[in-house]
């Protein structure tokens, strides 16, 4: 516990979903927290590591009040100024589409310097568990991670740039714009260019589909794949090492 004048703020990456895919540093921070503010993509099992603190869900869930970023910023600062050891727990990694920068900047206005603890980003956790070599020596030279749409609700212009590259392209928050994304890629790549999509990656309720630019939209509809999902595009998706090419099942915790 910390005294009234000594609250702290730690922004922690909770990993992609499997509650064992988290760092020891993150677990220690969770154990010691007086207050935890957590998002929808954080596995709630992780909260069992904290028996004494208070836990606030601040994510978005269908039919529930969802907190605005400004409300979360205010809660974080208020708790720290009350002297609390505050953990802000986020899905995946804290530096990948996590809005940590806004929380850090707001806290700094009150003289609070946040500490960040990295997590395994969903795209990296999913790629590894599905044995997708995002890079491979002499074959796939880079990874391009982008969002499906920007803060103004439009598809990111980077998708068109990425589609012209030879990078393994990873798109987060893109499943609801899949048709648009496929049509952008189709301008630059052939109809048989590989694409794979994973929903609830690293969790027991995981779903995944693979296909090509010409088949993926109907495959997604057939399999009922929806949010949260990550889209992988490029030859790495069809590498001989991938799980879908060797037809193995994954057992998750
Ligand atoms: C707001 S972003 C947060 C990303 C997070 N900071 C990270 O490093 O993974 C949320 C998006 O991440 C992706 N995502 C997060 N967890 C996922 C999971 N378990 N399976 C598939 N996609 C996931 C989805 O694209 C989802 O819409």
Image: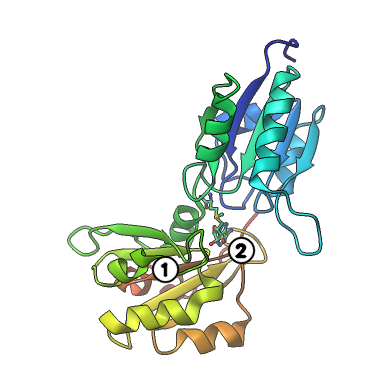
Q: Which quadrant of the structure image shows residue 207?
A: bottom right
Q: Find residue 123 and report its horizontal and vertical position in percent.
A: 47, 57
Q: What residue appears at the point 64 percent right and 20 percent down from the top-left corner?
A: 8
Residue tagged 1: 232
* Up/down of 146 relative to 76, above or below: below
The answer to whether residue 5 shows anywhere in this view is yes
- Specify the farthest residue to the left: 138
Asked which secondary structure carries label 2, the reply is loop
Q: Is residue 56 left or right of residue 123?
A: right
Q: Is residue 211 left or right of residue 87?
A: left
Disc marking residue 109:
none
Q: Which quadrant of the structure image shows residue 222?
A: bottom right
Q: Quadrant of ligand 1?
A: bottom right
Q: Nearer the viewer, residue 45 or 61?
A: 61
Q: Is residue 30 left or right of residue 133?
A: right
Q: Which quarter of the figure is the N terminus placed in?
A: top right
* Up/down of 96 relative to 51, above or below: below
CB at mark 2 closer than 8 A to ligand 1?
A: yes
Q: Which quadrant of the structure image shows residue 84?
A: top right
Q: Residues within 10 Å of mark 2 (few under 14, many from 20)?
A: many
Disc marking residue 200:
2
Distance of label 2 from label 1 (alpha carbons): 14 Å
Asked which secondary structure carries label 1, the reply is strand
Q: What residue appears at the point 61 percent right and 73 percent down from the top-left corner?
A: 226
* Up/down of 241 relative to 223, above or below: above
Q: Residues within 10 Å of mark 1 (few under 14, many from 20)?
A: many
Q: Nearer the viewer, residue 127 or 81?
A: 81
């Amino acid at each position: 516990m910390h005294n009234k004048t000594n609250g702290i703020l730690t922004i922690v990456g909770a990993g992609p979903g499997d509650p064992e895919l988290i760092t020891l540093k993150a677990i220690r921070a969770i154990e010691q927290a007086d207050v935890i503010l957590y998002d929808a993509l954080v596995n709630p099992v992780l909260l069992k590591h904290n028996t004494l603190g208070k836990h606030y869900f601040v994510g978005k869930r269908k039919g529930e009040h969802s907190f605005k970023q400004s409300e979360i910023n205010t809660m974080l600062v208020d708790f720290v100024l009350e002297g609390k050891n505050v953990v802000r727990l986020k899905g995946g990694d804290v530096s990948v589409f996590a809005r940590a920068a806004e929380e850090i900047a707001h806290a700094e206005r009150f003289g609070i310097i946040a500490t960040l603890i990295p997590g395994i980003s969903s795209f990296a956790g999913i790629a590894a568990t599905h044995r997708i070599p995002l890079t491979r020596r002499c074959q796939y030279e880079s990874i391009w991670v982008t969002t499906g749409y920007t803060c103004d609700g439009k598809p990111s212009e980077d998708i068109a740039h990425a589609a012209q590259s030879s990078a393994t392209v990873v798109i987060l928050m893109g499943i609801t714009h899949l048709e648009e994304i496929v049509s952008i890629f189709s301008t630059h790549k052939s109809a048989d260019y590989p694409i794979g999509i994973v929903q609830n990656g690293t969790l027991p309720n995981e779903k995944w589909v693979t296909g090509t630019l010409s088949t993926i939209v109907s495959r997604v509809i057939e399999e009922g794949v929806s949010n949260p999902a990550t889209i992988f595009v490029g030859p790495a998706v069809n590498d001989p090492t991938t799980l879908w090419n060797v037809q193995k099942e994954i057992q998750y915790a």
